[in-house]
Structure formats: C-alpha cells, structure tokens
Image (cartoon, rainbow, N blue to C red):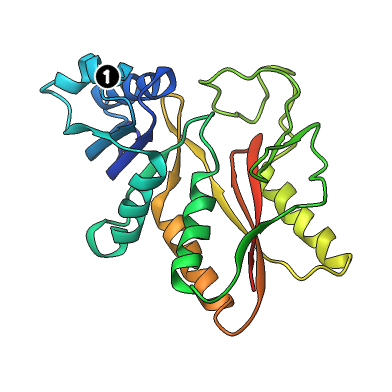
Amino acid sequence: MRERVSAFGTIVIVGGGCYGSYYLRQLGRAYHARAVTWQRIVVVDRNVACLTAAAPEMNDPALPPIESVTADWGEFFHGYLSRWETEGGSDDAVVPSPLMPHLMYEWLRDRAAARWPQRTISTRPLNATAGTPWERVAPDGSHYVSFADWMCPVNCIEPERCPHTRGPRTWTMPAAVKALVERRREAGDVIQGPIVFHCTHRAYGVGMIDTRDVVAADRQVAESAIDGPATFLVGTVSHCHGALNLLSVV
C-alpha cells in the first residue's frame, strides 16, 4: 500500500547555494516518487546567480511551480511571515539552511520591537548551558548547541538509531531545551516558554519547520508580554542541533 503523499502550500528554501540546491533536487526527486507535493516552492538568496538559478528543477515542466526570490533572508521573512495569516495557508513550511543565522528568532524580536516601540526589546545572554556535548555563543548572542561533537552529513534524517554512533538516539533537543527552562526556573529566573521551532524530516532528507508554528509564537509573545515585562527562551532545533536565544521585553 502506497504511503500518503505529504502536501504543502508554499515551501520556502533558505539559501540557493550548495545546501539549497541539494534540498531542491531532493524535493524534485520526492515529487517524482509521489512522496511529496506543493503549490509552490520559493528559493530565497541574495545572489541572483546562485546555484539553484541554473538547477534543472527550475525548468522542469513536470514539477509544480518553483520560483527564485532575490532578497536578504531577514527582509524576505519580514514580509512573508507578517502577511502569512491573511495570505498564506496552514500547510506552508520553511526549509532552513544549516549555516543561516537564527532567522525565526530575529523575526520574533523585530515584531516585538515594532509592536511596542516605547518598550525595550533585547537579546539577553543565556548565562547557562543546555548540557549538550557541543555549545558555542555567537557574537550576536545566539547560543548554538549540539548533541554531536562530530560532523553530521547534510542528509541525515536523525533516525532512532544514530548513523555515527550506530547506537540508539537517546536524545532530542526539544526535551533538552524544556529541561533547560525548568532548571532556570528552579534557580529563580522567570522565563516563558520554551518557544521551540522543531525542524523535522519530511521527505528524501529534507527537514522543515511549519510556518504556522512561527506565527503562533508571535501571538504567544504578544499575549504574554502585553501587560508587563517578559522573557522568552526561543529555539530553532532539530533532534540533534539547535540555536537558542533569550528574548527580553521590558
């Protein structure tokens, strides 16, 4: 019996370079294998001559519509996510790039700043560890975490048995982020959330975040911080890797 086809509205691929072109190729293969379909794919890159611009999938008449958008990632998501509730559908998804900044957090932060221009919106230091084997803090304050201290292949779907250790995958980043918030609360910090955008495997090695989860998080911030200060732990994660930030609204 054939498995049910995964159907999407708009799929946004972040970046049209080596990663984005790989994801586009895999989605094309998945479509031809009747594993996935979409209303349109949008590939976003600042370089008009990025790799996906010359990809054969762009001119494959057998595929549903695929278009390139030449834009800064942050600027694109400002327009796309801000209009999504009125112009988008509940089945949109985002294919993140492994090397992108924490774009979903940046959109939440900027939305809060636009919503409350008289309040102070900032990124606070995490000042804690998630307890993962690998952790780094970027200059912009983003806290990157990973259960892997080895190099993972781009097409890893994070199965229940880890391809590297060849043992069971006993970890998942959403649970680790939740545990981090609980430890911070026990230490006396007042933190909302966590707000977690979970990138999960959908087809042929391509992971996606549901757009509706990002828009719902914006509503959560708006409702929780409307009457006073609030701090939110925001994470974009897979099972094995993640980017974390603390959003402060004062």
On screen, residue 170 above or below 128: above
**In screen coordinates, is 90 left or right of 236?**
left
Please state the horizontal and vertical placement of residue 9, each as a whole percent of the image. 26, 46
User: Relative to the observer, which residue lies in front, 116 or 197?
Assistant: 116
Please state the horizontal and vertical placement of residue 214, each as a whole percent of the image. 46, 56
The count of marks equals 1
Q: Secondary structure at mark 1?
A: loop
- In the image, farthest residue toward the bottom: 227
**In screen coordinates, is 185 left or right of 137?**
right
| Residue sitting at x 65%, y 51% | 245
**In screen coordinates, is 173 left or right of 50?**
right
On screen, residue 53 above or below 81: above
Please state the horizontal and vertical placement of residue 68, each as a whole percent of the image. 23, 31
- In the image, farthest residue toward the left: 61
On screen, residue 111 above or below 53: below
**In screen coordinates, is 129 left or right of 71?**
right
Q: Quadrant of residue 52?
A: top left
| Residue sitting at x 66%, y 34% | 240
Please state the horizontal and vertical placement of residue 85, each as a whole percent of the image. 31, 63
Q: Which residue is mark 1?
A: 49
Which kind of residue does numbered mark 1 sit on?
A: Ala
- In the image, farthest residue toward the right: 187
| Residue sitting at x 46%, y 70% | 219
| Residue sitting at x 51%, y 39% | 200
Q: Residues within 10 Å of mark 1 (few under 14, many from 20)?
A: few
The C terminus: image quadrant: bottom right
The N terminus: image quadrant: top left
